Image (spheres, coloured by chain):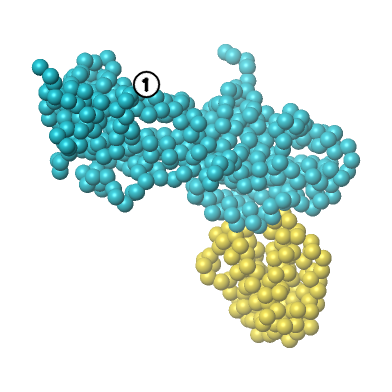
Chain colours: A yellow, B cyan
């Protein structure tokens, strides 16, 4: 994946949905990525810093997925991933996949705009690699 | 064989800083970088970190409260020294805000120990230390706690064989702060504002184990990062063997060269003083052009206020042809040390043998107001440093024509130079005419003639003495009475 192009969050998640993944499974997968993001960024920018990026991404995502507005954001220093998972689980699988992809895209763009694509890739590259390789491994058609 | 310990000195990667520190930064030292917000502390720390850290000897940058790390990363990567690819490889950022917020210094220390053990850094940075101190203030007995914290951190990092930097704000220099006692090195960064110019200065207040250079050293923060300008006396000068001893450099004005006894001795400094319009810059251009003809290269430091009305075309052509380097110094916040560095860089780049400073009056206006009080002393050091490289220097100086006293230079700069040529206006036959003389040429005989000269499209043309006239220096000569 080159730094310039957007990671194919949407195609991976939509494919999982079309292959029969439930909203619960998709929600778990998306929450896992966020947990990895938390592990990658919190030591460097602090828990509050990482949580603030999550909340901003949620806010940005809610413009195309209005229900995200009602997802509880939790305390200032945490990402309330339980609430996100719950919110995604209550959607149809296609909507959960689309919303999860929007959220990750918003976050990806946000971090890129703040610290640039190359430092973003340096800090988050392993997270994306895990996400995509993990999805491939679980891909029953692979 | 000596049994004394040898202290390695680390190259900081900050141009000029190693000289000012006295040869680099002692390895395993415990240093404090202090200064007001915006003075460049974090930038200095990052620049050193990226220069020093390797994957085998990584750096750990602990951010405490204060500047959010995300912002720090956003802004620091604007500098050339910031290499994103080194983050999480040779450079590790760790945020300690959560521990600091508890106000418990033991917890902060515990976390630092854990991170140090996990990452085994050769370099540790704590930014900013003020936050650690402030968070501790609420807990009572803060001075003792802080002293203990600093001592433990200092001990830990020294035995861990790590070179440590605490970055702090708002320290009061006279305060008996325990951090000052424990620190091996103390780098103080300042901003001096006078009128509408701001100059950055750095002072090495303490550096155990080596003689750092006392006093304030100017530095600039540019896209490449920080550059410190060590004083002229410290600049490591490489003397080029530009000319054989005894060589004379022609000024390109044949009769003037004769008056000098065959030209200006190589390695000399010459002051050309005269009133406005007397042809000082024309002579300076001729000096560079003559060098060009002889296959030599030159440098001109131009301090003109109107750069568009440029020098004569000869100099412009030489600049375009790459035979003459231009130090274009028309800012208002320059230090003399910085200008010297620029000149030396051009001299080195072109292996130049001729240097022109046009003019000293413009030079004085170009330096920041804060340096003008010491202009004369600084200028003496600058000239000494320049001629020490082996280059031959021609400086011009505006000299108001005063017919009541005989002056050769402003600010008593005559003593600075090895040679002086003075140009004057005289009134004769209802015309303003020009005369010049070689006033001084150290350790060499020279003409004592006062000769008339004219300026035409080919430069200066030196003519004859006005032997029928006397009182020329009074400006209004009279015919001799026989």
Whether residue B457 is situated above or below residue B156 in the rendered picture: below
Q: Secondary structure at mark 1?
A: helix
Whether residue B322 is situated above or below residue B212 in the rendered picture: below
Where residue B4 appears, as percent x and y from the top left, is 63, 17
In the foreground, A71 or A82: A71
Whether residue B210 is situated above or below residue B56 in the rendered picture: above
The quadrant of the rendering that contains the C terminus of chain B is top left
Quarter holding residue B105: top right
In the foreground, A19 or B389: B389
- 10 Å crowding of disc 1: few (<14), some (14-19), many (20+): few
Q: Residue at x 65, y 40 (%)?
A: B35
Q: Residue at x 58, y 58 (%)?
A: A119
**Label 1 lies in what chain?**
B
Q: Residue at x 63, y 29 (%)?
A: B205
Where residue B25 appears, as percent x and y from the top left, is 59, 31
The quadrant of the rendering that contains the N terminus of chain B is top right
Where residue B269 appears, as percent x and y from the top left, is 31, 26
- A73 displayed left or right of B231: right
In the foreground, B16 or B73: B16
Whether residue B200 is visible: yes
In the foreground, B169 or B478: B478
Where residue B36 appears, as percent x and y from the top left, is 66, 43
Q: Residue at x 20, y 19 (%)?
A: B448
Circle 1 is placed at which residue position?
B415
Whether residue B346 is visible: no
């Amino acid at each position: 994946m080159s730094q310039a192009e957007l990671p194919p969050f949407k195609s991976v998640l939509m494919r999982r949905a079309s292959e029969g993944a439930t909203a619960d499974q998709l929600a778990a997968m998306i929450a896992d990525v966020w947990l990895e993001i938390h592990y990658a960024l919190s030591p460097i920018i602090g828990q509050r810093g990482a949580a603030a990026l999550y909340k901003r991404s949620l806010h940005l995502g809610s413009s195309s997925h209005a229900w995200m507005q009602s997802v509880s954001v939790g305390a200032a220093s945490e990402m309330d991933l339980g609430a996100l998972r719950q919110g995604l689980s209550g959607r149809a699988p296609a909507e959960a996949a689309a919303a999860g992809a929007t959220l990750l895209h918003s976050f990806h763009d946000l971090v890129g705009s703040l610290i640039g694509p190359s430092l973003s890739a340096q800090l988050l590259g392993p997270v994306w690699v895990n996400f995509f390789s993990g999805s491939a491994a679980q891909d029953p058609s692979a | 064989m000596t049994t004394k310990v040898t202290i390695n000195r680390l190259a900081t990667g900050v141009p000029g800083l190693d000289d000012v520190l006295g040869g680099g930064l002692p390895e395993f030292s415990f240093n404090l970088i202090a200064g007001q917000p915006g003075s460049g502390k974090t930038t200095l720390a990052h620049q050193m970190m990226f220069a020093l850290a390797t994957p085998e000897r990584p750096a750990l940058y602990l951010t405490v409260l204060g500047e959010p790390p995300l912002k720090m990363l956003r802004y620091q990567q604007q500098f050339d020294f910031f290499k994103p690819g080194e983050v999480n490889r040779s450079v590790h950022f760790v945020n300690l805000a959560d521990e600091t917020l508890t106000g418990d210094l033991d917890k902060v220390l515990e976390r630092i120990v854990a991170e140090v053990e996990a990452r085994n850094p050769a370099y540790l940075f704590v930014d900013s230390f003020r936050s650690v101190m402030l968070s501790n203030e609420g807990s009572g007995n803060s001075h003792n706690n802080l002293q203990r914290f600093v001592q433990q951190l200092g001990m830990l990092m020294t035995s861990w064989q790590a070179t440590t930097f605490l970055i702090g704000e708002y320290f009061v220099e006279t305060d008996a702060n325990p951090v000052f006692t424990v620190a091996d090195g103390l780098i103080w960064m300042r901003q001096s504002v006078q009128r509408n110019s701001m100059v950055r200065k750095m002072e090495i207040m303490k550096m155990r184990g080596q003689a750092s250079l006392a006093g304030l050293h100017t530095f600039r923060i540019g896209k490449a990062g920080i550059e410190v300008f060590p004083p002229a006396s410290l600049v490591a000068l490489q003397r080029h063997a530009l000319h054989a001893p005894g060589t004379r450099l022609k000024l390109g004005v044949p009769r003037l060269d004769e008056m000098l006894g065959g030209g200006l001795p190589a390695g000399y400094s010459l002051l050309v003083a005269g009133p406005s319009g007397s042809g000082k810059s024309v002579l300076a251009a001729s000096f560079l052009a003559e060098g060009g003809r002889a296959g030599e290269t030159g440098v001109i430091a131009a301090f003109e206020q109107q750069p568009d009305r440029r020098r004569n075309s000869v100099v412009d052509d030489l600049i375009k042809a790459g035979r003459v380097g231009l130090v274009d110094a028309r800012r208002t916040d320059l230090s003399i040390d910085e200008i010297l560095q620029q000149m030396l860089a051009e001299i080195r780049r072109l292996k130049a043998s001729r240097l022109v400073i046009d003019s000293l009056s413009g030079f004085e206006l170009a330096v920041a107001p804060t340096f003008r009080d010491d202009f004369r002393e600084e200028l003496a050091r600058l000239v000494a440093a320049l001629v020490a490289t082996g280059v031959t220097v021609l400086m011009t100086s505006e000299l108001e024509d005063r017919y009541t006293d005989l002056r050769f230079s402003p600010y008593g700069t005559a003593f600075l130079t090895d040679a002086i040529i003075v140009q004057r206006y005289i009134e004769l036959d209802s015309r303003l005419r020009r005369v010049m003389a070689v006033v001084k040429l150290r350790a060499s005989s020279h003409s004592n003639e006062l000769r008339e000269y004219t300026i035409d499209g080919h430069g200066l043309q030196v003519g004859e003495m006005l032997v029928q006239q006397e009182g020329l220096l009074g400006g209004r000569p009279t015919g001799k009475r026989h």
